[in-house]
Amino acid sequence: MTTPPNDSTQSSAPQSTPADELKAIFLTCLLDSLIALDSGVKVREDSSLMSVKISESALLKVMTLLKQDSRFDFDQLQFHTVLDWPEEQRMECLYLLNSTKKSQELLISVSVSREKPQLPSVSKLWAIAEWQEREVYDMFGITYENHPDLRRIFLDDDWQGFPLRKDYQDEFMLRKPW
Amino acid sequence: MSVSSVSQDIASHLGSAPEISAAYFVAGLLGTVTFLTVMALILIYAERKVAAHFQCRLGPMRVGWHGLLQSVADALKLILKEDIVPYSADKFLHALAPVFAVVAMLLSLIAIPTSSRLALSDSNIGVLYISAVSGLGVLGILLGGWSSNNKWSLLGAMRAGAQIISYELSATLSVLVVIMLSGSLKLSAIIHSQEAGWWIWRAPGVGLLAFLLFIVSSTAEINRTPFDLAEGESELTAGFHTEYSGMRFAFFFLAEYLNLFVVSALGATLFLGGWMPFHIGNFSGFNAAMDLIPEFIWFMGKTAFLIFLSMWFRWTFPRLRVDQLMKLEWKVLMPIGFINLLLAAMMTLFGFYFFATT
Amino acid sequence: MVTVEIKTKISSLDERINAMALQGESPLGTQEYFVNMGPQHPSTHGVLRLVLKLDGETVREIIPVLGYIHRGMEKKAETLGYRQQVHLTDRLDYLCSVMNNWVVSAVVEKAAKIEINDRIQTIRTIFAELQRVQSHLLWWGVFGMDLGAFTPFLYGFRDREKITKIFEETIGARLTMNYIQPGGLMYDIHPDFVKDVKAMISYMKPMFKEYDELVSGNIIIQERLKNVGILDAQSAVALGASGPVLRASGVAHDLRKIKPYGVYEKVDFSIPIGTVGDCWDRYSVRMLEMRESLKIIEQLIDSIPEGKHLTMKPGAKIRPPAGIYYEQMETARGIFGVFLHSDGSEKPSRVHYRTPNFHNLWCLTKIAPGGRIGDLVSIISSLDVVVPDIDR
């Protein structure tokens, strides 16, 4: 198991401070709990944030644990967004969790297929997820099970396609005024 | 009071043939309308200047000397502007509403004496007449809001209706105090009763309280901040006149400022002695000096002071919320008004006020 | 064109409104009706549209309809180089443009491991705090106007102008600053900068008393704000609120304290927090924050270290290693975060902005129902929304 890259911008020399150690302990504790739920848990290496990859099926269980367990207390969902990997035929959904009590951040990453992307909604856990998931649906076309009000958020209801996907094209984009 | 009785009134003053009195009537009416329109333009200019100086800026400066002709230019623009009537509006009522608002104000001005000689109609029910006629103004607002077929307009109109009718009560209660003390409904008689001193201070406490009640409730009645809920531009876009433009909007605007003038003139008449000069007891020299100032100037000065007070409120206070507005009237102002009225009744009964004549 | 086979039900706005029309019944048996507040409305601060379900004057439910100023910022960002990202962020929350610049510069610096010196950090901090005061002053003026008092608006603008002048002197811009760039600053500070900032501080300090006399002490303001739009601490956190909105609910969460960036570690300042979480608390938190910001500037202004204002060659290509990077800071409205995914080329493969207003606005749908239209206006204003920041 490896610790994620150092979080601070300025100090390039990797020195181990008490805060870093605490973080390492936290991460170990976290990973142990996650592995108990999902054997496929991996740490995402190339991230400036503490981040773990989990499998699609375990998402709701993991999120519930992270929200409700007092050891983690991730009470805020900072953002929810997607990375599109067209050549690998998958999309990677990212959830950045934040704990206001423990000042910890954790990036959860879940891969879904590009053809039929569907995920369980976490709006029961964090109310704000309702809008964030609507935004992701609007831009990437990921649908959410048990979402209370799934519709487009920024674009018109009759918009075709999902603009932030890498292969998205429409007439407007092709026409160059210059 | 009908138009014919007004003309008869003038005729009886002049004591001449009906056709001459009719000519005088028309001339008087035209004169009044011109005077009031000019008045409204001046008031709009004054409001803009007062507001500007409250807000650390200069206000209109470009049209004429210090922007004196700005409101004329604005009026001209509004007259020339295209009049847009919403497609689904009730066309007839939509056109009628601003007329209602202006006419109600014009009618109520007839009864206010501007000096001992200059009064269009010194009716013996002057106060009653003004409160009856100025109540018609709300009809214009309600019609305008309803006929626009816009929910914001309707909301504004309903607010205005509820508000004006509620505040009419405490305004009347405060006016009743003066009527009781002076023992007359005739405005000139009320002014004459203040020869020895204005009612605001002559009836200890009661007069001042009645004056404050009158100021608050009349500000509410003419829909000015802090009671401008009917327009409430940040809540209802523009309230009842959202769908009005051009000349019709100008009419509502005119009515608003005429309203301000009427209410201030009434306040000055009832509480500040109208055209009566300011006198202090037996200082005959001072009193004689005060008498040199024409009565008309006294009247306009007092009115201008009240108008300035109203502008001061407008550019200082934020707006009340609709439920707070109703609470203020029904739970605060009206009980105070009734208690004040009782006190005034006792004072009148026992002659317990300064310079009591009985 | 990719079509997605939809398993879950996707509704539309019309369906949502129709569904809402059917549910619930007025306690008084009156007819409820729908009104569009916006997209052109004086107090929705731009092009926010709220579909209101009203029962007389009482707001029963709110559906915010977003996207009227959606410009596809995140898609645009994918076509721009790392150095160009700065210019997009100005157009998000235009009242915090310097702070937005800083966040995107910080994330690029973190990704490309660009070292910056103390001078840059100090100047960035001073500018961020100036911007915070400037933004709050504008909010204060607009807040007064939304409550029906027009005068505070001009007082706010009058004093905001003093700060804008300072910006204009150094940066040359008044609104969209483009000042902080990866690796430093666009320009060094103006020679008069220190003098002007000191003059501004000594001017501003007595002004707060005037604001309190004009607005805070007014009984109508207090009546309209107290116990209106109460957002308790727990729901504020759950709804993702941040910035003054979160702190007014009593959660002392400020990134400047929790994860200090810039030179916030070196300065002494406190975080004002509220107790109830009503509009009044949000109002007073911002009023106190302005004073704290001035305190921060005062401590820093005399000790700006010497050094270069740009640590790398201007125009040098930035090519961060592949990976994901995230940086967030406390702007005047809350946490603004920039998420960056680099594939090792000259352009980011994905940029996501975590904007404070998007999250703060969501609180509105939970706290405004039950109040009057007048309350709704004061709640929107106390949340201090900037619509381009929501729609991106």
Image (cartoon, coloured by chain):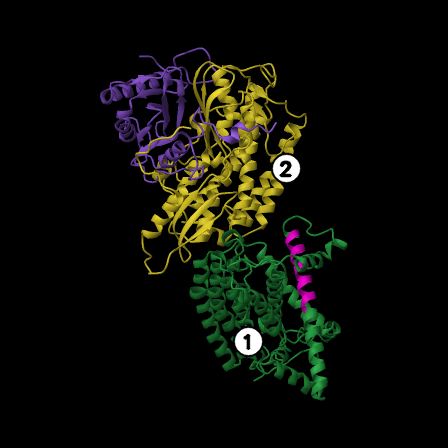
Residue, x 70% and y 65% (percent of image)? Answer: B38
Q: Is residue A11 left or right of residue B38?
A: left
Residue, x 56% and y 74% (percent of image)? Answer: B133
- Chain letter corresponding to the colour yellow: C
Is residue B47 on the magenta stretch? yes
Is residue B224 on the magenta stretch? no
Where B158 falls versus C319 (above or below)?
below
Question: Tag 1, which chain?
Answer: B
At label 1, which amino acid type do we have? Val
Where C242 falls versus B290 (above or below)?
above
At label 2, which amino acid type do we have? Lys
Question: Tag 2, which chain?
Answer: C
Residue B297: percent from left, percent from top: 71, 70
Quarter where residue C310 is shown: top right
User: In the figure, what tint was chain A given?
Assistant: purple
Q: Secondary structure at mark 2?
A: helix
Residue neighbourhood size for the residue with mark 1, other residues' Cα within 10 Å, grouped as few (<14), some (14–19), many (≥20): many
Where A153 falls versus B29 (above or below)?
above
Q: Main secondary structure of the magenta part?
A: helix
Of tags 1 and 2, the one toward the viewer is 2
Query: Farthest left residue?
Result: A36
Where B294 falls versus C269 (above or below)?
below
- Using the rendered image of the protein, determine whether residue C299 is visible from the camera's viewpoint: no
**Tags 1 and 2 in contact by the CB under 8 Å rule?**
no
Q: Which region is colored magenta?
A: B36-52
Residue B144: percent from left, percent from top: 53, 63
Q: Nearer the viewer, residue B317 or B32?
A: B32
Q: Is residue A78 left or right of residue B38?
A: left
Tag 1 residue: B178
User: In the figure, what tint was chain B given?
Assistant: green
Tag 2 residue: C162
